Image: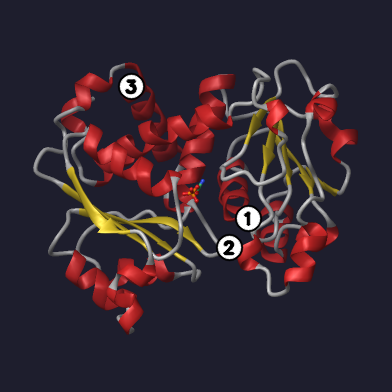
Amino acid sequence: MRHLISPLDLSVEELDDILELGKKVMEHPENYSHVCEGKKLATLFYEPSTRTRLSFETAMLNLGGKVLGFSSADSSSAAKGESVADTIRVISSYADICAMRHPKEGAPTVASMYSEIPVVNAGDGGHNHPTQTLTDLFTIKTLMGRLDHMTVGMCGDLKFGRTVHSLINAMVRYPGVRFVLISPKELRIPDYLRAEILDAERIDYIETDQLEKYMPDLDILYMTRVQRERFFNEEDYIRLKDSFILDASKMQYAKEKMYVLHPLPRVNEISTEVDNDPRAVYFKQAKFGVYVRMALIMILLGLDKEVR
Ligand code: CP
């Protein structure tokens, strides 16, 4: 039985395999509409979500399976003090696979230790969000035709943004990827990521607080929201929340083929005037999330072989 807690749980070959299956699903969804008949997905969301929970549910429904779950800690017995370990023991007898989002880093790892079904981390605190990474990689590969030899700008809250941490972990494994990490000083990437991944693996990167200056270099611009819910101090959030706002005037500095991604939800960091720019692909990215989650569910349930 496999779990997916971090993007590093997957080898590059396995990542490529999921993306390949996701592409087949996108091209011929009708071929996969019965693969999960008789199977159930539980979505255990202790923290708010729109895309991740609903794209997981859409993915399972598209595969002919069923879904159950809760969308907030308040509507589950967590509100009465039940532990994640006890919850997953019970859910293991109700469902065949589960996706869990939790505000505490490591909660899905704990669940995987007590689970009898595959556990997918759907976002744990400021730590990891591996299925968003699959979505991001699928988007980049589909639009650019490759995942190597490119300059990726990441802009906004690089400290608390778990999608940034997961995407860096995944993309450093492809050759020739260079990062431009754009954030206020207070919201730079965590030290462990800089020391243990970027420096240890001699990755080409720079840290800056200047978006316009580096725009012409970028092949991908990955914008992120400042994560209000992870701040200890509201004053700091208010001071930092509008540090970077991508608008049409800044897009003039970008390459004709630079793509703007964002895991969403967006707050102020991308002006709505950018939405109609053909380089703005964040809504397409959210749609792609369904295809990769369909591929992942099939692979974790061992149902992919018969439909390849
Ligand atoms: N990208 C993402 O995780 O969105 P949600 O918080 O809406 O699930």
Q: Which of marks 3 and 2 is in front?
A: 2
User: Do labels 2 and 1 touch, CB within 8 Å?
Assistant: yes
| Residue pointed to by mark 3 | 24
Q: Which amino acid type corresponds to the residue marked 2 in the rendered image? A: Gly
Give residue 98's position: percent from left, percent from top: 28, 56
Can residue 150 be seen here?
no
Q: Distance between the residues labelled 3 and 2?
A: 32 Å
| Residue pointed to by mark 1 | 161
| Residue pointed to by mark 2 | 126
Q: Say which label, 2 or 1, has the lower sequence index.
A: 2
Q: In this view, does 209 lie to the left or right of 147?
A: right
Q: In this view, does 123 lie to the left or right of 55?
A: right
Q: Which amino acid type corresponds to the residue marked 1 in the rendered image? A: Gly
Q: Say which label, 3 or 2, has the lower sequence index.
A: 3
Q: Which mark is residue 31?
A: none
For the point 28% across and 17% down, the residue is 28
Q: Say which label, 1 or 3, has the lower sequence index.
A: 3
Q: How far apart are marks 2 and 1 (CA)?
A: 6 Å
For the point 80% across and 58% down, the residue is 240
For the point 52% across and 35% down, the residue is 137
Up-down: is 206 above or below 21?
below
Quarter containing the N terminus = bottom left
Give residue 219's position: percent from left, percent from top: 71, 26
